[in-house]
Image (cartoon, coloured by chain):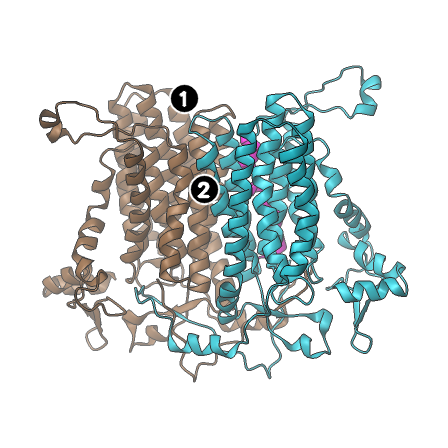
Chain colours: A cyan, B brown
Amino acid sequence: MATRRRPPSSSTSSAPPIADEVRSRDPKPSAAAAAAAAEDPPLAPPKLGFVAAASALFFVPFFYLAFVHYPIEPDLRRSIAISVAMSFGGFLVALRMIPVAARYVLRRNLFGYDINKRGTPQGTVKVPESLGIVIGIVYLVIAILFQHFNFTSDSNWLVEYNAALACICFMVLLGFVDDVLDIPWRVKLVLPSFAALPLLMAYAGHTSIIPKPLIPYVGVPVLDLGWIYKLYMGMLAVFCTNSINIHAGLNGLEVGQTVVISAAVLIHNIMQIGASTDPEYKQAHAFSIYLVLPLLATSLALLSYNWYPSSVFVGDTYTYFAGMALAVVGILGHFRHFCSSFLPQVLNFLYSCPQLFKIIPCPRHRLPKFDPQTGLLTGTKDGTSLTYSLDCLVGAQKGLFASNF
Amino acid sequence: MATRRRPPSSSTSSAPPIADEVRSRDPKPSAAAAAAAAEDPPLAPPKLGFVAAASALFFVPFFYLAFVHYPIEPDLRRSIAISVAMSFGGFLVALRMIPVAARYVLRRNLFGYDINKRGTPQGTVKVPESLGIVIGIVYLVIAILFQHFNFTSDSNWLVEYNAALACICFMVLLGFVDDVLDIPWRVKLVLPSFAALPLLMAYAGHTSIIPKPLIPYVGVPVLDLGWIYKLYMGMLAVFCTNSINIHAGLNGLEVGQTVVISAAVLIHNIMQIGASTDPEYKQAHAFSIYLVLPLLATSLALLSYNWYPSSVFVGDTYTYFAGMALAVVGILGHFRHFCSSFLPQVLNFLYSCPQLFKIIPCPRHRLPKFDPQTGLLTGTKDGTSLTYSLDCLVGAQKGLFASNF
């Protein structure tokens, strides 16, 4: 949960807007709002060079595998090409909309101060919050439009696709409500479980699983788990959602981890399609590509503003959205090895357990310590894998981390 | 669009919360937030007597028709009974959650002053805004849970049901984003069209229509309109959404009109089911009942707080949500006479056209005039059917309206 702090009493933030019991069709923003917007300096330009380099790292192998290396059916290639084109469109729209939305959220006093830069001039800059809402909406629009190019109303996939949209949309909504209203923990724990339900209902894939090394001992190659498998999937959705969120706190880390996982999932998918001859198996992985490509593209747009030094923050809106989108991609792509993509998050969770379950005291902010003198972040004894990693690293590596986050 | 006003400079509203770039698992609200909450007086109790009377008016005929009058199949009756029970649960949850959420939105400075009470002590009370978010989330949770009782993963209905959930959820999200950020008109006009797309893709009903009086002239009883019919449905969704919103401005009017339309749709559905022998036709109308019952129940909970004098406002969140939910109910219930439920809204739109299209000047607030001396609302020359009606009414009727709104 993002527990908000009140600003210091000396803060001269502009007064919040107030709603009348009235609707108006006047398109002009009020003079006061315009004045408030004029106060805020424009956003730093996006770090497109960095994003281009990162994109090349992911997309060059993907394009090579999809369009050169594997003999994939023309129809499937066409669908992937459409998805790529639409995702690129989404990237451009998100890139264009983030500065616009940043003005809107600042006007509504949705901003934060970067506590990892406390004590420096950068630590006093108002950084717009919750920009994940732009990414969530752009992603949903792309996903909705895409089905018009690839599905007919009698398609089997349409059930799962619409369930995926409903789940992701519900998580974006809950994330944004959380960012705005700070909903309490007990509500937040329950609602994502509901958000994952349409997906479980629509899931038409296998519910049987035996880990390969165990097959000789169990004696049967297939064990149908039925509702237990569905329960596992529901818990996976809740885990993914929270595991992206729990890692938040450093510039670019929420989006960065999503980009890395998405890229890995994307390349894994195309390799599975290339290596398989089973049409249904190929379709499942193609489905996963259609959902993960726009996630990767829109996240890269957000990363260009959120990378160190962050000019926008992503908010719970983004972490919940990205977590649920990845869970949906994993579940509906019928992945068997999906959990391995989340290995760092699983380790982080295990390492965090003593503090999460209050066995040892849990501080309010589990973050590295910032030293304004050296400009470096150093590790703390807080139980996150990140602070632990920083605590273990020395010398040159410390400098490397500090310059990157 | 709800164009917000800044508060007067003498306002001593509490400072807005600020987000750090940090996530915390501390469930305790900050002391400042608790103090701010303590400042606000508790919400007036819900007007349950009025709501019970209104409910009796709608539900007694419905129960009589569904469980006594018509010989409906036991399976269908069981599903309807489950839907009724879940909707009643939703009513209770919404009733319980609205005061809680009201504290949260006030803490975040989402409130308005009732300009129809300007000049009286009631006009200076901070009324919490956007309580439609509670109704939207409770509705979605009921709708998601309900499918577990009535659908299996190979059900034909599941496609349409999930598409409906995705559409409604997207509209709740856009409504809440609008309430918080005041998104501009051009964006608001485009996005609901996207939100309606999953529905159109999933729509598996007829796309042919000939108005009965025209059949002798056209010569064929069925004319397949194909994509034109889908375009019509998309425009219907956008129309419904905006037509509930355009009527906003008086205490209880947004929710009141939704309750009246929902109740009419509910009773129409059960009559169609009772009178038909076609299983598919019955299923379509049962589907419509499953979606409209929770809408009616949760809206009644909101109405108990929003009826004159309003202790909460509903926000664009509610008007968009209710409009899209009704459109979905109409489209997926394969209604032929659905538009007639919206007749007052259609008339209001036609009467508003000269101002909407800027043929005559459009004031920022098209509302009746409030006279603090008499406590009465009087009509104005603004082009809404409501102000026109008030303008036409005299004497006793004026008093009646003033005491009710």
Instruction: Report whether B269 appears left or right of B156.
Output: left
Of residues A234 and A51, the one nearer the viewer is A51
What amino acid is at disc 1? Answer: Asp
Magenta extent: A183-202
Report which quarter residue A396 is drawn in. bottom right
Residue of label 1: B75
Quadrant of the image occupied by residue A128? bottom right
Whether A261 is drawn above or below B224: the answer is below
The residue that mark 2 highlights is: A145
The amino acid at mark 2 is: Leu
Q: Residues within 10 Å of mark 1 (few under 14, many from 20)?
A: few
Front one among A252 and B128? A252
Tag 1 subunit? B
Secondary structure character of the magenta stretch overall: helix
* Relative depth, front residue between B375 and B228: B228
**Mark 1: secondary structure:** helix
Q: Is residue B217 magenta?
A: no
* On-image quarter of the N terminus of chain B: bottom left
Expressed as whole percent of the image width and height from the top left, the position of residue A122 reads 68, 75
Q: Position of residue A266 (x, y in %)?
A: 65, 40
Q: With A214 as the anchor, is B173 left or right in this view?
A: left
Q: Nearer the viewer, residue B292 or B60?
A: B292
Q: Is residue A352 above or below residue A381?
A: above
* Residue A116, position as x, y percentages in the image: 73, 69
Which of labels 2 and 1 is toward the front? 2
Task: Name which quarter of the figure residue A264 lies in.
Answer: top right
